[in-house]
Amino acid sequence: MRPYAWLLALILLTQTAHAQTIPIFRDPAQPLNARVNDLISKLTIEEKADQMMYNSKAIERLNIPAYNWWNEALHGVGRAGAATVFPQAIGLGATFDDDLARRVATAISDEARASFNVAVAKGYRMQYSGLTFWTPNINIFRDPRWGRGQETYGEDPTLTGRLGVAFVQGLQGNDPRHLKTAACAKHYAVHSGPEKLRHEFNAEPTPQDLWETYLPAFHQLVNAKVEAVMCAYNRTSGEPCCGNQYLLQDVLRKQWAFKGHVVSDCWALVDFYQGHKVVKTPAEAAALALERGVNLNCGSVYPALPEAVKLGLTTEAKMDSSLAVLLRTKFKLGLLDPQGSSPYDKLGPEVINSAAHRALAREAAQKSIVLLKNNGVLPLRNDLPKYFVCGPNATNLDALLGNYYGVNPEMKTFLEGIVGGVQPGSQVQYRQGALLDRPNANGIDWVSSSSRASDATFVVLGITGLLEGEEGESIASPTFGDRLDYNLPKNQIDFLKKLREKNDKPIVAIITGGSPMNLAEVHELCDAVVLAWYPGEEGGNAVADVVFGKVSPSGKLPITFPKSLDQLPAYEDYHMAGRTYRYLAAEPMYPFGYGLSYAKFTYPSLKLATLKVAKNKPVNVTATVTNSGKVEGEEVVQLYVTHAAAKGTQTPLYALKGFQRVKLAPGASTTVTFTLSPEQLALVNAQGQSVAAAGPVTVWVGGALPSARSVALGASPAAKAVLTIK
C-alpha cells in the first residue's frame, strides 16, 4: 500500500459509515416521497396524530423541532412583530392590479422568511413565526353585512381569482424544489357569514351559483398549485365543509386533482359535535374529518385519532396516507433540512420594513384609494393659508390596520400624512371633534368654527375593526362583527352636518372601512369623498399624495355599494339572485368598478376580430383608450360581457372577464387587447354545468361597470360591440 493510502481509505470508510447513520428523512438529496415514508415509519401512532395538529410538539428522539402551522399574512406578516403593513385585502382588490398583488406578496414572503430565519436562530418556534400562511381569503363578498368581507378581494370571481393567484405566486416563490412560504386558499367553500351562526349554519347555494360564483377562484388557485386549502366552519348543502364528501373528495381531490394539504378552520372539527351535531364524540369527528381528507387540524380533535383507530372508525394506514400529504409541505419548506439547504435561508432582517417595502406599501395604498365624488375641489393646492383636520379616524391607528394585521413602528395616520404634504408657511390645525360610534359626552362643539375659519377641511369618518370583523374581535359590535346596520354611526353624520352649516369652504371626506356603507349623506354634504379603506402603514401619506395631486386616484370599487340593505335579499340567503353587480337590478349608490380620476379617460372605439365566432373559438377584443384630460393618470380598463337572457334562466346582467391597468399622459391614447376564450364566453346552467353560449353577446370595454349609474356619477361611457356566437 502506498504511503498514506491506508489513511485515505480510513477517512473514506468513516465518511461512508457516517453517511449511513443519517436517516433518509434528514437527507435533502433523497427523493421527497422516500423522506416522507422514512419519517412516518419511525413514528408511533400518537406521534403521527400530534404531527397532524397545528401545534405539533417536538420529537426529541428524532431531533424534530416543534412547529406551529398557524401563521397569518393577509396584508403583511401578521401578529409576529415588526412588518410592513400593506393595505387590507379589499383595498388591494380595489387596485385591480395583479402585478402589484404579486409584488406585495413577494415582499411579504421575503419578510416572513427573514423573520423565521432570525427566530429559529434564537431558538424561538412560536405560533405566528412559521412559514405556513393561512391566506389569501378568496371567499366572495356577496353581502355588505359580512364583517370579514374586508379580508377578500371583493364580489367578483374573475377579480378574486386573478388577484388570488398572483398573491399565491408571490408567497410561494418560483424555486422548483423549495417553497418560500406555503399559501392557503380559504375558506372552502361557500362561506361569507353570518358570523354569529357560522359554527352551525348551512349555506345552500344553487348548483349554478356554486359553480358560477363560489368555486371558480378556488379552482384557479388549485391550478396555480396553492399548497393548502382551508375548509370552512359552516355546512354547505347539508354537510360540514370539513367533512364534505362532494367538496373535499369529489371536487377538490378528484375533479381538480389537488395535491396539497387540507387544514381545518380553527376548532371547526369541534363544530361537528357541538354545532352541526353530525357526530357525538371527538373520536367520531376525527375519523370523519380524516376519511373526508383533512390533513391538518387547527383545534383539539386529532389527538383522538388513536382512539378512533382503536374503535375501528378509521385505520392507521389512513393516518399514514394523510400525514404523508402534510409532511410533503414540511419538506418542501425545508423545515427538516440543514441550514443553508434552501435558497431562502439567506434572507435576513434587513428586508423587514425596508425602504423598498415602505415604498411598495405607499404605491399599493395610492392605487387602492377610490375617489367617489369630486365637484372640482380636488386636487387641492398644498400651500393654502390654513387647513383643518378632524374626525374620529384622523389619528386612529385602527383605521389603518383592518383585521389580521401586523404592526409597524412608523404608522402614518391621516393627520400625519396631511401635515407632511402641506408646504411650510401654511397652518394645519387638528381636533378630533367626534367619537367613532357615540355622541360626545359634553356636547361642546369647538370644531365647526375652526372649520369655517379654514381654507379647507379634511374630515376622516368611517368605521374600523372595532365595528366590523371576525366574531370576537370586533369588540364594539353587538352583532359579532357583522354590520346589520348599513349606515355610518349617527353621531358621525350629525358631526358632518354641523361642519357644513354656514360653511362654504371645501370639505373633503376621507372614509375608512372595509365594506360598503351608506354614504348618501356624506356624498351630499361634502365637496369630495375619498374612500381610503384600511390603507396600511403608508395610508396617511398615500391619501395626502392623492388629495394634493401628487398622484391621480386610480382605485375602482371591487364591490357594489347599494343604496340600502332593502335592495338586497336576506343575509342568510346564499342564492346570488339580486346580489352583486351581476344580478342586482336596482340602481346602486356606487357601482362595481367605479372610481373617478383627475385625468379624463374616454373610449372612442372598440373592435372585435370577428363579429361572428364559433362556440369553441376565442375572439380578440381591441379598444382604444384616450386621456383627454390635463393630467397624467392610470386607468383600470375593464371588459364585461352581457349575454342575451334566455327565458326562465338566471343570466348575469354583466360579467367582468378582463382588466388591465394603463398609464397615459394628457392627450395620449393607447390600444388595449383582450382575448375572450370559449370558457369566458360560456355560461353556467341551472345544473352547474358550463355550456357554450349561443346568440348575441354584448362586449363592453370601459373604466367602470357599463351602467347608467356609472355615467351619472361621472364615468365615461363604455365602448361596446355585439358578438354573435354560432
Image (spheres, helix red, strand yellow):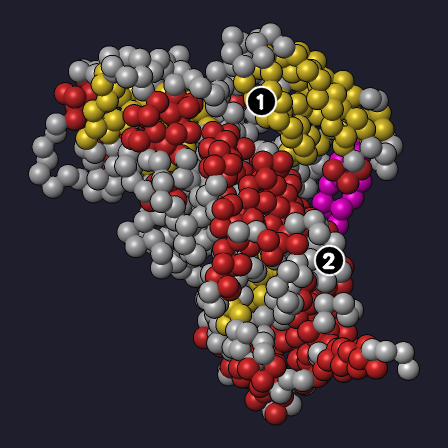
The one of 499 and 697 positioned closer to us in this rendering? 499
The one of 210 and 267 positioned closer to us in this rendering? 267
Report helix, strand or loop for mark 1: strand
Q: Is residue 578 magenta?
A: no
In the image, residue 366 above or below residue 167: above
The location of residue 116, given as percent across then percent down, is 52, 59
The location of residue 112, given as percent across then percent down, is 53, 53
Q: Give the amino acid type for the residue marked by disc 2 in the picture.
A: Arg
Q: Quadrant of residue 399?
A: top left
Is the residue under label 1 in contact with that under label 2 (CB below 8 Å)?
A: no
Marks 2 and 1 sit apart, C-alpha to C-alpha, by 38 Å
Whether residue 23 sits left or right of residue 147 in the image: it is: right
Residue 139 visible in the displayed image: no
Q: Residues within 10 Å of mark 1 (few under 14, many from 20)?
A: many
Residue at screen point 43% across, 61% down: 197
Residue, disc 2: 177
Residue, disc 1: 635
Q: Give the amino acid type for the residue marked by disc 1 in the picture.
A: Glu
Instruction: Find the magenta span and give its range.
Output: 681-695
